[in-house]
Amino acid sequence: MIEPLANENVPSTRNAVKRYVQPSGSESRLITPIKKTRVAEEVADRIRTLMLDGTFPPGEPLPSERHLAERFGVSRGSIRDALRTLETIGLLETRHGQGTFPHELSVERLVAPLASVMAYRSDLQDELLDVRRMFEPAVARAAALRATDEDLTDLERILETQRQKLKSGQSAIAEDTAFHAILARATRNRVVMSIMATLNDLLVESRTQSLQQKGRPARSMDGHEAVVAALRRRDAEGASQAMYNHIDQIADLHVPAHKGSNPPAK
Protein backbone atom coordinates (compact mmCIF):
# COMPACT_ATOMS: atom_id res chain seq x y z
CA MET A 1 0.00 0.00 0.00
CA ILE A 2 1.39 3.43 -0.97
CA GLU A 3 1.34 6.07 1.72
CA PRO A 4 -0.11 9.54 0.92
CA LEU A 5 2.20 12.09 -0.64
CA ALA A 6 4.44 13.96 1.75
CA ASN A 7 3.68 17.67 2.13
CA GLU A 8 5.96 19.13 -0.47
CA ASN A 9 5.66 21.64 -3.24
CA VAL A 10 4.60 19.32 -6.04
CA PRO A 11 3.63 21.15 -9.27
CA SER A 12 0.43 19.24 -9.91
CA THR A 13 -3.32 19.72 -9.92
CA ARG A 14 -5.74 18.65 -7.21
CA ASN A 15 -6.85 15.65 -9.24
CA ALA A 16 -3.30 14.47 -9.78
CA VAL A 17 -2.63 14.66 -6.03
CA LYS A 18 -5.78 12.72 -5.25
CA ARG A 19 -4.51 9.88 -7.42
CA TYR A 20 -1.65 9.45 -4.98
CA VAL A 21 -3.79 9.80 -1.82
CA GLN A 22 -5.99 6.96 -3.02
CA PRO A 23 -3.86 4.95 -5.48
CA SER A 24 -5.38 2.39 -7.77
CA GLY A 25 -4.35 -1.24 -7.77
CA SER A 26 -2.26 -0.87 -10.93
CA GLU A 27 -0.57 2.22 -9.50
CA SER A 28 0.27 0.35 -6.31
CA ARG A 29 2.01 -2.32 -8.35
CA LEU A 30 3.89 0.14 -10.53
CA ILE A 31 5.02 2.74 -7.99
CA THR A 32 7.06 0.41 -5.81
CA PRO A 33 10.81 0.13 -5.16
CA ILE A 34 12.85 -1.13 -8.11
CA LYS A 35 15.48 -3.80 -7.60
CA LYS A 36 18.84 -4.61 -9.11
CA THR A 37 20.08 -3.41 -12.51
CA ARG A 38 18.73 -1.31 -15.39
CA VAL A 39 17.13 1.05 -12.92
CA ALA A 40 16.61 4.01 -15.25
CA GLU A 41 15.11 1.80 -17.97
CA GLU A 42 12.71 0.21 -15.50
CA VAL A 43 11.66 3.63 -14.19
CA ALA A 44 11.05 4.83 -17.75
CA ASP A 45 8.93 1.74 -18.48
CA ARG A 46 6.82 2.27 -15.37
CA ILE A 47 6.30 5.98 -16.05
CA ARG A 48 5.25 5.16 -19.61
CA THR A 49 2.75 2.62 -18.29
CA LEU A 50 1.38 5.15 -15.81
CA MET A 51 0.94 7.59 -18.69
CA LEU A 52 -0.98 4.98 -20.66
CA ASP A 53 -3.35 4.14 -17.81
CA GLY A 54 -4.08 7.82 -17.10
CA THR A 55 -2.27 8.13 -13.79
CA PHE A 56 0.00 10.73 -15.38
CA PRO A 57 -2.39 12.42 -17.86
CA PRO A 58 -1.35 14.81 -20.65
CA GLY A 59 -1.34 18.45 -19.67
CA GLU A 60 -0.61 17.84 -15.98
CA PRO A 61 2.96 17.98 -14.63
CA LEU A 62 4.62 14.92 -13.20
CA PRO A 63 5.47 14.88 -9.49
CA SER A 64 8.90 16.26 -8.60
CA GLU A 65 12.07 14.24 -9.16
CA ARG A 66 12.49 13.94 -5.39
CA HIS A 67 8.98 12.61 -4.94
CA LEU A 68 9.34 10.10 -7.79
CA ALA A 69 12.69 8.97 -6.38
CA GLU A 70 11.08 8.33 -3.00
CA ARG A 71 8.11 6.46 -4.47
CA PHE A 72 10.22 4.27 -6.78
CA GLY A 73 12.95 3.80 -4.18
CA VAL A 74 15.74 4.93 -6.53
CA SER A 75 18.15 7.85 -6.77
CA ARG A 76 17.20 11.19 -8.29
CA GLY A 77 19.89 10.55 -10.90
CA SER A 78 18.02 7.46 -12.08
CA ILE A 79 14.81 9.49 -12.26
CA ARG A 80 16.55 12.17 -14.33
CA ASP A 81 17.94 9.53 -16.70
CA ALA A 82 14.50 7.97 -17.10
CA LEU A 83 12.83 11.32 -17.79
CA ARG A 84 15.56 12.23 -20.26
CA THR A 85 14.96 8.95 -22.12
CA LEU A 86 11.21 9.58 -22.34
CA GLU A 87 11.78 13.16 -23.45
CA THR A 88 14.19 12.03 -26.18
CA ILE A 89 11.55 9.77 -27.75
CA GLY A 90 8.92 12.50 -27.53
CA LEU A 91 6.78 11.22 -24.67
CA LEU A 92 7.63 14.01 -22.21
CA GLU A 93 8.20 17.74 -22.46
CA THR A 94 10.10 19.90 -19.95
CA ARG A 95 8.73 23.42 -19.55
CA HIS A 96 11.06 25.85 -17.83
CA GLY A 97 9.70 26.88 -14.46
CA GLN A 98 6.63 24.65 -14.77
CA GLY A 99 7.77 21.05 -14.66
CA THR A 100 7.78 17.97 -16.87
CA PHE A 101 4.59 17.20 -18.78
CA PRO A 102 3.43 14.02 -20.56
CA HIS A 103 2.58 14.39 -24.23
CA GLU A 104 -0.60 12.98 -25.71
CA LEU A 105 0.32 9.42 -26.71
CA SER A 106 -0.35 9.36 -30.44
CA VAL A 107 0.57 6.64 -32.91
CA GLU A 108 3.00 9.04 -34.56
CA ARG A 109 4.94 9.52 -31.34
CA LEU A 110 5.23 5.77 -30.82
CA VAL A 111 6.38 5.05 -34.38
CA ALA A 112 8.73 8.03 -34.88
CA PRO A 113 11.70 6.55 -32.95
CA LEU A 114 12.01 3.84 -35.62
CA ALA A 115 12.59 6.49 -38.27
CA SER A 116 15.21 8.18 -36.12
CA VAL A 117 17.20 4.96 -35.85
CA MET A 118 16.85 3.82 -39.45
CA ALA A 119 17.79 7.21 -40.88
CA TYR A 120 21.37 6.64 -39.70
CA ARG A 121 21.62 2.93 -40.47
CA SER A 122 21.96 2.44 -44.20
CA ASP A 123 23.28 -1.06 -43.48
CA LEU A 124 19.77 -2.05 -42.40
CA GLN A 125 18.22 -1.71 -45.86
CA ASP A 126 18.25 -5.50 -46.23
CA GLU A 127 16.21 -5.83 -43.04
CA LEU A 128 13.92 -3.02 -44.16
CA LEU A 129 13.07 -4.92 -47.33
CA ASP A 130 12.34 -7.96 -45.20
CA VAL A 131 9.98 -5.86 -43.09
CA ARG A 132 8.22 -4.73 -46.25
CA ARG A 133 7.77 -8.37 -47.31
CA MET A 134 6.11 -9.16 -44.00
CA PHE A 135 4.04 -5.99 -43.72
CA GLU A 136 2.92 -4.71 -47.11
CA PRO A 137 1.33 -7.91 -48.48
CA ALA A 138 -0.84 -7.93 -45.35
CA VAL A 139 -1.73 -4.29 -46.01
CA ALA A 140 -2.74 -5.13 -49.58
CA ARG A 141 -4.82 -8.07 -48.34
CA ALA A 142 -6.76 -5.87 -45.91
CA ALA A 143 -7.12 -3.10 -48.48
CA ALA A 144 -8.74 -5.52 -50.95
CA LEU A 145 -11.50 -6.14 -48.41
CA ARG A 146 -11.93 -2.59 -47.11
CA ALA A 147 -11.11 -0.19 -49.94
CA THR A 148 -13.85 2.24 -50.92
CA ASP A 149 -14.62 3.45 -54.42
CA GLU A 150 -12.82 6.67 -53.50
CA ASP A 151 -9.69 4.74 -52.55
CA LEU A 152 -9.74 2.85 -55.84
CA THR A 153 -10.27 6.06 -57.79
CA ASP A 154 -7.31 7.69 -56.04
CA LEU A 155 -5.11 4.69 -56.77
CA GLU A 156 -6.14 4.74 -60.46
CA ARG A 157 -5.39 8.46 -60.61
CA ILE A 158 -1.91 7.85 -59.22
CA LEU A 159 -1.33 5.06 -61.73
CA GLU A 160 -2.35 7.33 -64.61
CA THR A 161 0.06 10.05 -63.46
CA GLN A 162 2.75 7.41 -63.08
CA ARG A 163 2.10 6.23 -66.65
CA GLN A 164 2.40 9.75 -68.04
CA LYS A 165 5.63 10.40 -66.19
CA LEU A 166 7.02 7.06 -67.32
CA LYS A 167 6.31 7.95 -70.96
CA SER A 168 7.99 11.35 -70.63
CA GLY A 169 10.95 10.05 -68.65
CA GLN A 170 10.09 12.03 -65.52
CA SER A 171 10.64 10.82 -61.97
CA ALA A 172 7.58 9.29 -60.33
CA ILE A 173 8.94 9.06 -56.78
CA ALA A 174 6.05 11.11 -55.40
CA GLU A 175 3.50 8.80 -57.04
CA ASP A 176 5.34 5.70 -55.85
CA THR A 177 5.17 6.99 -52.28
CA ALA A 178 1.56 8.14 -52.56
CA PHE A 179 0.48 4.75 -53.93
CA HIS A 180 1.61 2.93 -50.81
CA ALA A 181 0.19 5.63 -48.53
CA ILE A 182 -3.28 5.39 -50.08
CA LEU A 183 -3.15 1.61 -49.98
CA ALA A 184 -2.52 1.87 -46.24
CA ARG A 185 -5.37 4.36 -45.91
CA ALA A 186 -7.68 1.82 -47.52
CA THR A 187 -7.16 -0.53 -44.56
CA ARG A 188 -8.95 1.98 -42.28
CA ASN A 189 -6.32 1.28 -39.62
CA ARG A 190 -4.50 4.30 -38.18
CA VAL A 191 -1.57 2.26 -36.91
CA VAL A 192 -1.05 0.78 -40.37
CA MET A 193 -1.17 4.26 -41.91
CA SER A 194 1.40 5.58 -39.45
CA ILE A 195 3.76 2.64 -39.96
CA MET A 196 3.45 3.04 -43.72
CA ALA A 197 4.22 6.75 -43.42
CA THR A 198 7.36 5.85 -41.48
CA LEU A 199 8.36 3.27 -44.08
CA ASN A 200 7.80 5.81 -46.84
CA ASP A 201 10.08 8.28 -45.04
CA LEU A 202 12.76 5.61 -44.72
CA LEU A 203 12.45 4.63 -48.39
CA VAL A 204 12.89 8.09 -49.95
CA GLU A 205 16.62 7.68 -50.57
CA SER A 206 16.45 4.09 -51.82
CA ARG A 207 13.53 4.94 -54.13
CA THR A 208 15.44 7.90 -55.54
CA GLN A 209 18.37 5.64 -56.39
CA SER A 210 16.46 2.59 -57.59
CA LEU A 211 14.02 4.48 -59.83
CA GLN A 212 17.01 5.76 -61.78
CA GLN A 213 17.93 2.22 -62.80
CA LYS A 214 17.01 1.14 -66.29
CA GLY A 215 13.68 -0.68 -66.35
CA ARG A 216 12.94 -0.05 -62.67
CA PRO A 217 10.15 2.56 -63.17
CA ALA A 218 8.33 0.25 -65.59
CA ARG A 219 8.58 -2.69 -63.18
CA SER A 220 7.26 -0.53 -60.38
CA MET A 221 4.35 0.49 -62.58
CA ASP A 222 3.59 -3.15 -63.44
CA GLY A 223 3.65 -4.08 -59.77
CA HIS A 224 1.26 -1.30 -58.80
CA GLU A 225 -1.15 -2.19 -61.61
CA ALA A 226 -1.23 -5.83 -60.49
CA VAL A 227 -2.10 -4.79 -56.95
CA VAL A 228 -4.90 -2.45 -58.07
CA ALA A 229 -6.31 -5.09 -60.40
CA ALA A 230 -6.59 -7.49 -57.45
CA LEU A 231 -8.22 -4.77 -55.36
CA ARG A 232 -10.80 -4.20 -58.09
CA ARG A 233 -11.65 -7.91 -57.96
CA ARG A 234 -11.76 -7.80 -54.14
CA ASP A 235 -9.19 -10.59 -54.32
CA ALA A 236 -7.41 -10.42 -50.96
CA GLU A 237 -4.95 -13.24 -51.60
CA GLY A 238 -4.26 -11.98 -55.11
CA ALA A 239 -3.52 -8.49 -53.78
CA SER A 240 -1.19 -9.93 -51.15
CA GLN A 241 0.70 -12.01 -53.71
CA ALA A 242 0.91 -9.11 -56.16
CA MET A 243 2.43 -6.88 -53.48
CA TYR A 244 4.86 -9.59 -52.43
CA ASN A 245 5.98 -10.00 -56.04
CA HIS A 246 6.33 -6.24 -56.39
CA ILE A 247 8.63 -6.00 -53.36
CA ASP A 248 10.55 -9.10 -54.43
CA GLN A 249 11.34 -7.45 -57.77
CA ILE A 250 12.63 -4.40 -55.93
CA ALA A 251 14.74 -6.61 -53.67
CA ASP A 252 16.28 -8.31 -56.72
CA LEU A 253 17.63 -4.93 -57.79
CA HIS A 254 19.10 -4.19 -54.37
CA VAL A 255 19.83 -7.49 -52.66
CA PRO A 256 20.41 -10.46 -54.99
CA ALA A 257 20.46 -12.82 -51.99
CA HIS A 258 16.70 -12.40 -51.61
CA LYS A 259 15.97 -13.73 -55.07
CA GLY A 260 13.82 -16.79 -54.97
CA SER A 261 12.72 -16.34 -51.36
CA ASN A 262 9.54 -18.07 -50.38
CA PRO A 263 6.26 -16.20 -50.80
CA PRO A 264 3.85 -15.86 -47.92
CA ALA A 265 1.64 -18.86 -47.20
CA LYS A 266 -1.82 -18.64 -48.63
Image: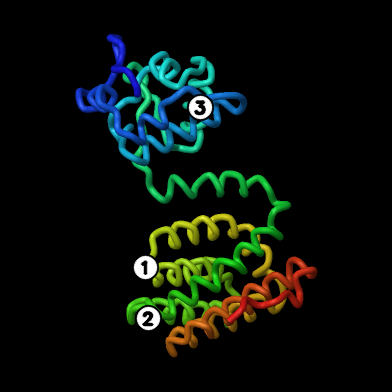
Q: Position of residue 249 (x, y in %)?
A: 68, 76
Q: Which residue is mark 3?
A: 82
Residue located at (44% from left, 74% from top): 142
Q: Which residue is mark 2?
A: 153
Measured Cα–Cα span from mark 2 to mark 3: 48 Å
Q: Residue furthest bottom?
A: 233
Mark 2 or mark 3, earlier in chain: 3
Name the foreground residue: 167 vs 111: 111
Select label 1 or label 3 by which is in front: 3
Mark sitting on residue 171: none
Q: Secondary structure at mark 3?
A: helix
**Mark 3 crowd level (few <14, some 14–19, many ≥20, 10 Å Cα):** many
Q: Which residue is mark 1?
A: 188
Measured Cα–Cα span from mark 1 to mark 3: 35 Å
Compared across the picture, whether 211 is left or right of 6 comes to right
Mark yes or no: residue 225 visible.
no
Residue located at (63% from left, 73% from top): 247
Mark 1 or mark 2, earlier in chain: 2
Select label 1 or label 2 by which is in front: 1
Q: Secondary structure at mark 1?
A: loop
